[in-house]
Amino acid sequence: MDSVAPNPAKNGKDTDIVVNADGDLSFAGQTYRAAIGKTGMRADKTEGDGASPTGIWNLRYVMYRADRLPPVKTALPVYQLVRNDGWCDDPHSDAYNRPVRLPFAKSHEKLWREDHIYDVIVALDHNDSPAIAGRGSAIFMHIARPAYDGTEGCIALAKNDLIAILANCTVSTRLCIGQK
């Protein structure tokens, strides 16, 4: 992915979400605490390396748990999660880095979890058009664990912060990981 500058908005505020290696996330004139990949950020992301992929990523859509939260208010497309939603993380599968329905025979993540980190998920366009085997899958924005533990590569925020950010996103908002 080419490095490009964040999008300036007509009102003078950045329309992009920018997160740095220290976990400082900036959007619309506000700064938030974020968890990043447990091994930091990498330009050469690989499956299972625990790194957040540097680059500028489009926000595709939002998924949320309707049994735990009201509908998320955002300009992005929004979908309700159901119990059998999953995401394929098997580089040898034709469904690699795509949503799947469970049960699913290949390696996958369950999106319907007992903990709360996937109560709100923002799907990004990282490695999805086309998905290249081994370049990383299931890179999302989602809810952080209480201690902001490092993620497997996602960007995670407090629930209220993520919901506030989504309320101010447009279909043009991008997530800039490790980009200035």
Image: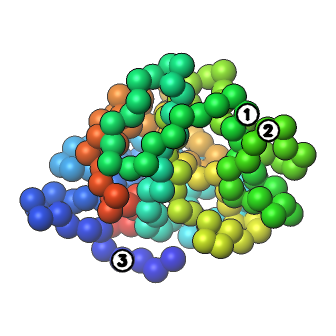
x then y, percent, for residue 20: 40, 55
Residue, x 46% and y 80% (percent of image)? Answer: 2
* 176 with respect to 36 (left or right): left
Q: Is residue 67 above or below residue 45?
A: above
Give the mark count: 3
Left or right: 108 with respect to 11?
right
Q: CA distance from mark 3 to mark 2?
A: 38 Å
Q: Point out the residue furthest to the bottom here.
A: 2
Mark 1 or 3, closer to the camera:
1
Whichever of callouts 1 and 3 sits on the residue coming sooner in the sequence is 3
Q: Quadrant of the C terminus?
A: bottom left
Residue wearing tag 1:
84
Identify the residue at image location x=46%, y=63%: 57
Q: Which amino acid is tagged 1? A: Asn
Closest to the observer, 20 or 60: 60
- Percent from the top left, x then y, of residue 121? 52, 40
In the image, residue 37 above or below residue 131: above
Label 1: few (<14), some or many (≥20) within 10 Å? few
- Describe residue 47's horizontal placement relative to residue 18 as left or right: right
Tags 2 and 1 in contact by the CB under 8 Å rule? yes
Percent of width and height locating residue 3: 42, 77
Rounded to the nearest whole Å, what is the CA distance between mark 1 and mark 3? 37 Å
Say which amino acid is labelled 2: Leu
The quadrant holding residue 95 is bottom right
Residue that label 3 marks: 4
Residue wearing tag 2: 102
